[in-house]
Image (spheres, rainbow, N blue to C red):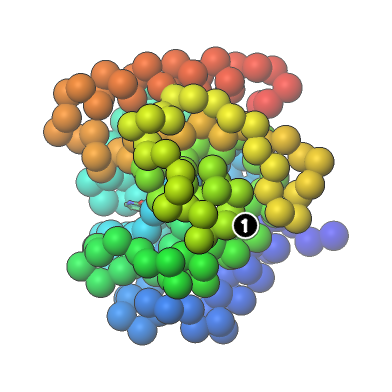
Amino acid sequence: MLSKSLELENVKEEIVSAKLPLHESATNLVFGKGNPEARIMFIGEAAGRNEDLQGMPFVGVAGKNLDKLLEQVRLTINDIYVANILKYRPPENRNPNEEEISAHAPYLLKQIRIIKPRVICTLGNYSTKYFLAECNVAGMKNQPGITQVHGKEKIIELPGMEGIKIKLIPLFHPAAIIYNRKLTELWEEDMEVVKKVIEQKELM
Ligand code: URA
């Protein structure tokens, strides 16, 4: 059997061969980082400028903020795996459209099927709505926004992983909370939920 790292490498190669929308304007594929054996995944939206240049998710300002927030719950990059819905940066960081999400998200699902996390923390509206819509991109627009659902745990099942229960914890996007005191407070409350979940022994 292939190791998870090798399986992930294969998905990376598949993405390169698929020539997904946005690949032409991007500098690098931004696939994921962290521990493939992790029990907890954090899922953002799409790379920004620094991520595009380095080919690594959450390495810019939002990434620094995420690192700080993870520290609060005593998590390091070795405890988690981080990826995005989109695998390439949208030009000028514009919002992703339905066609792009539909083309990219199946590769995120492949990553999840390999890593098999017990907990998924979504960061911001896009990844949250994607999972709340049961991975049906057209259904995302009917989902509540992150301000309504942040910190509320939900058990989900993903296509191709039927029978496996995953705990979804929607969180504000770290870029959104950087200069917002109110959101920082709410994030800290939500992190208490994350902390409680990861302290359950069977998860880690
Ligand atoms: N924001 C995201 O959603 N993902 C990144 O990788 C960087 C910023």
Secondary structure under badge 1?
helix
Question: Residue at left 33%, top 32%?
Answer: 147
Whether residue 128 is visible here, answered yes or no, is yes
Whether residue 31 is visible here, answered yes or no, is no
- Quadrant including the N terminus: bottom right
Label 1 is placed on what type of residue? Leu
Q: Quadrant of residue 186?
A: top left
Question: Residue at left 31%, top 80%?
Answer: 25
Which residue reaches farthest left? 179
Please provide percent x and percent y for residue 82. Answer: 48, 47
Q: Is mark 1 within 8 Å of ligand 1?
A: no
Q: Is residue 144 above or below residue 9?
A: above
Question: Residue at left 46%, top 44%?
Answer: 143
Which residue reaches farthest front? 142
Q: Nearer the viewer, residue 7 or 147?
A: 147
Horizontal side of residue 61 vs 165, given as left or right: left
Q: Nearer the viewer, residue 100 or 17?
A: 100
- Quadrant including the C terminus: top right
Horizontal side of residue 128 vs 198, given as left or right: left
Residue assigned mark 1: 109
Q: Quadrant of residue 63?
A: top left
Please provide percent x and percent y for residue 76. Answer: 46, 33
Q: Is residue 158 above or below residue 49?
A: above
Horizontal side of residue 36 vs 147, given as left or right: right
Please provide percent x and percent y for residue 95. Answer: 29, 61
Q: Nearer the viewer, residue 69 or 193?
A: 193
Q: Residues within 10 Å of mark 1 (few under 14, many from 20)?
A: some
Q: Is residue 44 above or below residue 120?
A: below
Question: Residue at left 63%, top 51%?
Answer: 112
